[in-house]
Image (cartoon, rainbow, N blue to C red):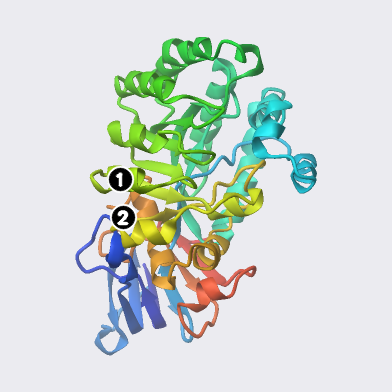
Amino acid sequence: MILIKNIKKLVQVEYEPIRLRRGEEMNTLHTIDNAWLRIEDDKIHSFGQMIDCEDITAETVIDASHKMVFPSFCDSHTHLVYAGSREIEYIDKIKGLSYEEIAKRGGGILNTSKKNAQSSENELFNSAFERLEEIKSLGTGAVEIKSGYGLSLESELKMLRVIKRLKEKSPLTIKATFLGAHAVPAQYKNEPDKYVDLIINSMLPAVSEEKLADFVDVFCDRGFFTVEQTDRMLSAAAKYGLRPKIHANELDYSGGIQIGVKYNALSVDHLEFTGDAEIKSLLNSRTMPTLLPSAAFFLNMPLAPARKMIDSGLPIALASDYNPGSSPSGNMQLVLSMGCIMFKMTPEEVINATTINSAYAMDLSQTHGSIAVGKKANVFITKSIPTYEFMPYSFGNNKIETHILNGKIQ
């Protein structure tokens, strides 16, 4: 048992757990001043104000004077299983080449796909585990990891097996997403529908047989997969019980949001191009709009209309998009800051967007994303900070002193 006492502020407390916050509700953030938190086994047992703290005998007692306790971040969109890096393309971007131009030259996703194919499963596992340890130190307690740098049956299965091994070794809660439809391989450049057939007829059955994925994803956007192709793949994936999470509207008004809503996608992600029709579609759905500010920042892209989306009554989740090409960072503390600076979201909104709402985008909000009795004991203790608003305000440094996952100090 762990007892954390004298907590300056216990943040994101829920007495009646919720699944998400939307619209005006995203400005709601329940806290307790001068608090205590009791953890038993891997669950949150109880909490309250110090004045009401019972005389509890605990194996571990942590004095959190002048410090705050938050639920761990939930990062609902990453691609952190990859080989090598792509800093040369970074120079190409600086010189003015667009994301699409780099992709057409064989760079981008196809570049990493080639490196992944040449790497062993152990090499991919070891590098990905290092990245998990990195994001754990920065406060992430749950993470979604996609395949998609395989683009062949063999390589996609290799990536998903790596993710399965990561689930077994890492204390982080991990969700696996099959993203065979991340890009069209070079050999199918002139016959993309044949690659779609490969995904439907070979990849999906193999992924399902080995039980390697929790979700399925498609990059439905200009220059990648069309709405019609996405429709075919999602229809096939539904037969295997795989709920979608869609890359949508990063490069254009692609129809990706609407096709995601049609198939009850858990989330639609990126969303730089989101207009009234897309907002209307999302308002009538159970799909979480997920924004990836560090990718938009790194690629210098137009920003998703976050303020308009929230003011229209939508929920918003924020995630890191940790990957080698467009967001080589999994720092969710930085994502907090970017949400405020780039999207004009309030501190309360970005905290909700990186905890309870991003947990929802991974189908985890019943167990993660807030401080509530019975939820997973995934919390972090900050260093001495003046207010919770300081978390997004002070960007670029690690403000976390202690991280507890599954009831164990890391």
In terms of depth relative to the viewer, which is nearer, 233 or 84?
233
Residue 251 marker:
none
Query: The disc labelled 2 sits on which kind of residue?
Result: Leu
Q: Residue at x 38, y 45 (%)?
A: 362
Residue 247: image x %, image y %?
47, 37
Residue drawn at point x = 45 percent, y = 59 percent: 73
Of the 4 image quadrants, the one containing the N terminus is: bottom left
Query: To which quarter of the image does residue 217 belong?
Result: top left
- Lower position in the chain sequence, tag 2 or tag 1: 1
Q: Tell me the kind of residue under disc 1.
A: Leu
In the figure, 385 relative to 174: above or below? Answer: below
Q: Is residue 213 visible?
A: yes
Q: Secondary structure at mark 1?
A: helix
Residue 261 falls in image quadrant: top left
Q: Position of residue 288 (x, y in %)?
A: 34, 47
The answer to whether the residues at label 2 and label 1 have Cβ atoms under 8 Å apart is yes
Does residue 76 appear to the left or right of 38 in the view shown?
A: right
Name the side, left or right, on which 54 lies relative to 84.
left
Pinpoint residue 297: horizontal percent, then vertical percent.
61, 54
Q: CA distance from mark 2 to mark 1?
A: 7 Å
Up/down of 124 relative to 144, above or below: above
Q: Residues within 10 Å of mark 1 (few under 14, many from 20)?
A: many
Q: Position of residue 353 (x, y in %)?
A: 40, 59
Rendered view: 199 above or below 350: above
Question: In the image, is 398 to the left or to the right of 29?
Answer: right
Q: Which residue is mark 1?
A: 282
Residue identified by numbered label 2: 314
| Badge 2 element | loop
Query: Residue drawn at (72%, 23%), measured in percent from left and top?
Result: 118
